[in-house]
Image (cartoon, helix red, strand yellow):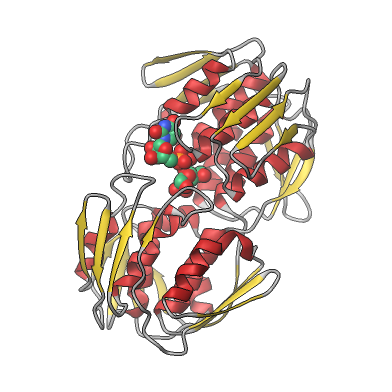
Amino acid sequence: MAKLLIEGGVPLSGDVPVSGAKNAVLPILAGALLADGVVRIGRVPHLQDVTTMMELLGRMGVELALDERLWIELDPTRLREHVAPYELVRTMRASILVLGPLLARWGRAVVSLPGGCAIGERPVDLHIKGLRALGAEVELSGGYIEARAERLSGTRIVMDLVTVTGTENLMMAATLARGTTIIENAAQEPEVVDLARFLKRLGARIEGEGSNTIIIEGVERLSGGEYEVLPDRIEAGTYLVAGAISGGRVKVTGVRPEHLDAVLLKLREAGAELAIGTDWIEVDMRGRRPRAVDLTTAPYPGFPTDMQAQFCALDAIAEGVGLIRETVFENRFMHAQELRRLGADIAVEGNTAIIRGVPRLSGAPIMATDLRASASLLLAGLVAEGTTVVDRIYHLDRGYERIEEKLARLGARIRRIR
Ligand code: UD1
């Protein structure tokens, strides 16, 4: 199995381009199922999760191709299957995103329940409840969600809690429903907004995306169309932390700085100097050791849970004590145990990690447990003395495009080994 070998201790320096956002491209690819024509998507990152989503769509009968600009071309008009099988859903929870579009456009969807997941329970009850409110018949049997509807009907849905893919599934389903759907307590993440913009490009009528109330006026059909995915704010944030943790200077390019407000605030508190342009951000630590920061994760525009693990790594070598509270997912501190193997002083009590910064970490073999946890281990490896070998990096390949190349470009001594 592939591993990453890192020789720590180099302050990173240079520019790194940011790829298209994983969490935007996945719902957008699923959303192509709604179209009545060919859809072309640009800035698609080369990630394992994207490959999984394309495999899923391909098995259903969506025709996939690359056009001359290397945009992905999807023709969903000759769909044969309405099934998302367990073997794919279990490798990627975001497969649940086909549920809403299949049902709305094709009247039928059979999607495996995702089951347990390394970072907590992660149920899909709100997706199901919302679809029932839109008039679908939904049954659970044999580990599958089986949903049917002649045509969905618009309604007012108040989400019990903020869910990103839940909001996306219901927004997609509502685009073809009869009448108006109002989603209250909707997720406000930039990726939800990106999906709404894509759907509007196909002819959907949506208002309020980016606020907590999204209003969707159902239409008869959606056409084909083109769309370019927004840049990945989590990837950008991860490279900025790489700059900060290593005491270096890193500029991320091709980003939307306004999507990173909560993360930039914490980098400043950690003592980083920031320069921000229209589509770039530069972090400069001037060789200093970071100061520990406290933070609490929350739905957007709060501090993203997908950046929590990376800040645990930062606090691990910072001056002072950092309190990191996770409120979005239970059980999202698996990286704490592995970071301890590098010498970090982390205690986890309930949903809070108490991190006492140590002056140095030392290299060791460690194991990745989920996507963002893997990123935090890699970051810690960049500053640990000696050699760190990170095992199970397939988690990283799910969400970071060519991560070792991008880090090597910044001067990191890193390579992939078998
Ligand atoms: C999405 C992101 C993921 C990110 C997360 C939170 C994608 C593909 N993934 O995941 O990277 O970490 O948002 O920002 O976009 N919940 C329920 N019932 C439901 C749905 C969710 O109880 O039906 C709970 C979850 O267990 C969790 C919380 O709601 O505690 C938020 O989860 P949610 O926003 O749904 O996460 P995802 O959409 O799966």
Quick check: which quadrant has ligand 1? top left
The answer to whether 289 is drawn above or below residue 132 in the figure is: below
Res 269 → quadrant: bottom left
Camera-side residue of 100 and 315: 315
Camera-side residue of 28 and 166: 166
The answer to whether 399 is drawn above or below residue 118 in the figure is: below
Report the quarter where the N terminus lies: bottom left
Camera-side residue of 148 and 53: 148
The answer to whether 180 is drawn above or below residue 411 in the figure is: above
| Residue positioned 71% across, 70% down in the render | 278
Res 259 → quadrant: bottom right
Camera-side residue of 318 and 66: 318
Residue 374 position within the rendered picture, expressed as x and y whole percent measured from the top left:
36, 60
| Residue positioned 61% across, 61% down in the render | 19
The answer to whether 175 is drawn above or below residue 417 in the figure is: above
Side of 31 where 352 appears, left or right: left
Residue 336 position within the rendered picture, expressed as x and y whole percent measured from the top left:
25, 61
| Residue positioned 36% across, 52% down in the render | 370
Q: Is residue 91 at least partly visible in the picture?
A: no
Residue 364 position within the rendered picture, expressed as x and y whole percent measured from the top left:
23, 72
Residue 313 position within the rendered picture, expressed as x and y whole percent measured from the top left:
33, 69
Report the quarter where the C terminus lies: bottom left
Q: Is residue 231 at least partly visible in the picture?
A: yes
Q: Total label count? A: 0
